[in-house]
Amino acid sequence: MINFEKYINNIKIKNNTKDVPVFSCLIKDKKIVFHSNNNSYKRKKITGHAEINVINKAIRKMNNANLSDLTLFTTLEPCLMCYGAIKQAKISNVVYLTENIKMSFRNDVNIDEIKMNITKLEDSKLELKYQNLISDFFKHKRK
């Protein structure tokens, strides 16, 4: 299994911006081949979500927009915008650590229409660590 904890620790260290601390990566053969973080505020781009950043990075480096042989892992369940990018890149396997309570699309879109395998990573210790990280981020942001 991939050690996602080191990447979560890394985003905690870099968390000196207004960007929500989200880590996303693309996996092939149980190895991380591309990774990225949120940078919407830093880059002043609404599309600067970690999922879209890692997809764009992979497309540029692979010179191919078909990423169907990769699995996307992300610390926070993707929003509807990111699911659109995931679908466009033909990624059919998505694994997320924590549900996105505020920006989840599940109340508005039938998940069956998206046709991708979406799995929640069952790691309660790591999920709690990430939930605390993101909670602390928003507490600090709202001071």
Image (spheres, grey):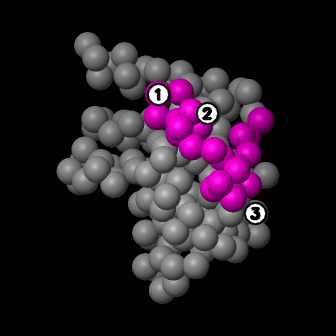
Q: Amino acid at mark 2?
A: Thr
Task: Tell me where residue 53 appears, x and y as whole percent.
Answer: 42, 60
Residue type for callout 1: Lys
- Name the outermost residue toward the top: 143
Per the picture, the main secondary structure of the magenta-coloured stretch is: loop
Q: Is residue 22 above or below residue 24?
A: above
Write the residue at 28% across / 35% down.
18
Foreground: 60 or 116? 116
Question: Total of numbered circles in the picture?
Answer: 3
Residue 89 percent coordinates (x, y):
54, 70
* Mark 2 → mark 1, Cα distance in angstroms: 12 Å
Start-end of magenta stretch: 101-122
Q: Nearer the viewer, mark 3 or mark 2?
A: 2
> Residue 98 shows which numbered tag?
2
Dot 3: what SS?
A: loop
Q: Which residue is mark 3?
A: 30
Q: Amino acid at mark 3?
A: Lys
- Pointer 1 or 3: first along the chain: 3
Q: Nearer the viewer, mark 1 or mark 3?
A: 1
Residue at horizontal 51 percent and vertical 79 percent from the top: 65
Q: Which residue is mark 1?
A: 102
Q: Is residue 139 visible?
A: yes
Question: Do labels 2 and 1 touch, CB within 8 Å?
Answer: no
User: Which percent across, then down, holds residue 64?
Assistant: 52, 84
- Residue 116 colored magenta? yes
Q: CA distance from mark 3 to mark 2?
A: 20 Å
Query: Can see residue 94?
Result: no
The quadrant of the image that shows the C terminus is: top left
